[in-house]
Image (cartoon, rainbow, N blue to C red):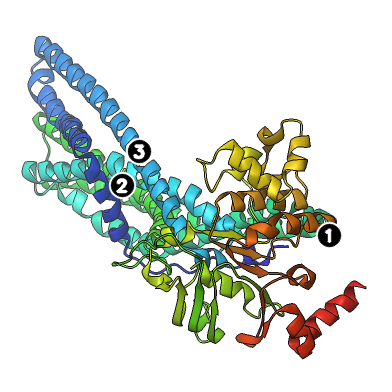
Amino acid sequence: MAINSTREDEELEESLKLDVLKRLLLNLLEYKKEVAIVILLILLTVGISTAAPLVIEKIINDEIYDGNVKGLIIWACIMLAFFTVHFVATRVWRRIMAEISNDMILSIRRKLYVHIQELGVDFFDQRPAGKILARVTGDVNALKDVLSSTVTTLAPEAISLIVIITIMTVKSPLLSISAAVAIPIIMLGLYFCEIIAHKKWQSLKKKDSNMTAFIHEGIEGVAVIQSFNAEEEANKEFDGIVNEVIKAFKAAVRVTDIYSPTIEIASGLGTATLYYLAVAKLGVQAESIGTLSAFALYLSMFFSPIRNLANYYNKLITNLASAERVYEIMDMIPLVKDGEEVTDIPKIKGEVEFAHVDFAYPDEPDVDILHDVSFKVKSGETIALVGPTGAGKTTIVSLISRFYNVKNGAVLVDGYDISKVSIQSLRSQLGIMMQDNYLFSGTIRDNIKYGRPGATDKEMLEASKAVHAHDFISKLENGYDTVITERGGGLSNGQRQLVAFARTLLTDPKILILDEATSSIDTRTEILVQQGIGELLKTRTSFIVAHRLSTIRNADRIFVIDDGGILEEGDHESLMAKKGAYYDLYSAQYVSAS
């Protein structure tokens, strides 16, 4: 079915995970006031938690040992008040953090979406839509877990650990060895997860991205699948992809789960060491029971944040793979973008010139698609581009639209090098209609006005009538307010093209580009469209890429494109009389049609 969706995801550049965390934390600086409140509340809760064993030590040694019931009740009330404050403070800072993380993720998702829109067609040429969708949805959601866990787990647990180690060391350097003996085991497990688990989770993210892409293509191409009775084959391929995801997940989990037992082993070793030192080396007496109990609590508390930090780290390395994928796209520099000193191109007349243009696609820079192409087009001329598939016809109109940058030479509009003018000011004066013109979910009215939302209904009707779209739209139950689904579901191919034609013409472009724009329209409808746009083409410069040569007979000039350049140039009659490449193409198509 979809070969592209099953290949391994594009390779990520190796990035330092600390850099990803740093970028996330820098985003937190936008919420300085809220973060400051969270930090203060975390310090308060950590202070209460770490002070509890000292209070218990005092209660056992001073109150319980001496049988002071009144003192015991007073300290119990104090502890109840402390833990009430702890409970309320924890709820407050967690709620604040949830609001911050949600707001940040919405902002990051919006920035990512906007940035993707700026990356240009070369980016989309190399990636299935499903994989891009996985970045904007699933990978960004994973960022929320990284951000939230960093504050809700890393900060309080790390602070608690530091405070606990300090108190243990101050109270008894000897007994503190019980915690120190566990550190080598913990660090060994951490190193193991760092090296191996991160790669496993990155692999899982790639497999998961492949699955999303496959599902997306399966939905988009369901008609093709059904028409070829390929459901069983598609299902088998999907099962294979799902199995790859499951295997990658199991591999990642197996490595990650190894770390948890190391914490338990370290905890048991530390506890055994504590009691050995207390009994064998210190000779603990009854009056020291409170101190030993406090130390046992601190040792338990010592391993608790380590255990929580281990779980956090496991989640972190899982989600950092997603974070890296998001920032990998955010860091991409658009190949086609405005320079530092661009100017807006003024209202154009429509003169176009190619001056010794060489072009190669970004992924194959050494393979020239166009070589030393030069021509001049006057304002109002209609130019037809013909030639075999892959000759460079669409490439030429894509360069005029500045979807790509030229390798050498220059493309000029009204004498302006388009690489030195703003893209927005150029494209706002172009009308571009491709073979597959996307219609959005919504009404037909909204789709026609998409490129010019401020257009009046009268202007919309004039554009629709000019391309003979009004006739079929007016017969629909709700007319222009008829709701269509994604890609124009509910309309025929010809009707979708007519709506797209009306949308393009409504923008009143000075340069009109039609790339196989009538290929999905039946012959009768095509004749109506040609009649409708005939007068409109006289007022604007037009470039027509057409497979049906009969549709471009009235073009002012016809360029035969092949071998990276213009083989022949002239009107229909002169080129037919020449009996060259155009004559061969036209004759072959005429014979085929008959």
> Spatial distance from mark 3 to mark 2, Cα to Cα?
25 Å
Determine whether 135 is above or below 440 in the image: below
Q: Which mark is residue 103?
A: 3
One can see residue 372 in this view: yes
Q: Which mark is residue 523?
A: 1
Tell me where residue 170 appears, x and y as whole percent. Answer: 6, 44
Q: Earlier in the sequence, mark 2 or mark 1?
A: 2
For badge 2, the amino acid type reads: Leu
Disc 2: which residue: 309
Q: Quadrant of the C terminus?
A: bottom right
Q: Say few, some or many: other residues with alpha carbon within 10 Å of mark 1 (under 14 / 14 to 19 / 20 or more).
A: few
Q: Earlier in the sequence, mark 1 or mark 3?
A: 3
Tell me where residue 61 appears, x and y as whole percent. Answer: 9, 25
> Spatial distance from mark 1 to mark 3, Cα to Cα?
53 Å
Q: Between label 3 and label 2, give the one nearer the viewer.
A: 3
Q: Earlier in the sequence, mark 3 or mark 2?
A: 3
Under tag 1, what secondary structure? helix
User: Residue at point 35% right, 51% down?
Assistant: 313
One can see residue 246 in this view: no
Q: Between label 2 and label 1, give the one nearer the viewer.
A: 1
> Spatial distance from mark 2 to mark 1, Cα to Cα?
69 Å
Q: Between label 1 and label 3, give the one nearer the viewer.
A: 1
Tell me where residue 122 appears, x and y as whole percent. Answer: 51, 68
Q: Say few, some or many: other residues with alpha carbon within 10 Å of mark 3 (under 14 / 14 to 19 / 20 or more).
A: few
Q: Quadrant of the N terminus?
A: bottom right
For badge 3, the amino acid type reads: Asp
Q: Nearer the viewer, residue 480 or 318?
A: 480
* Left or right of residue 451, residue 224 in this image: right
Report which quarter residue 164 is drawn in: top left
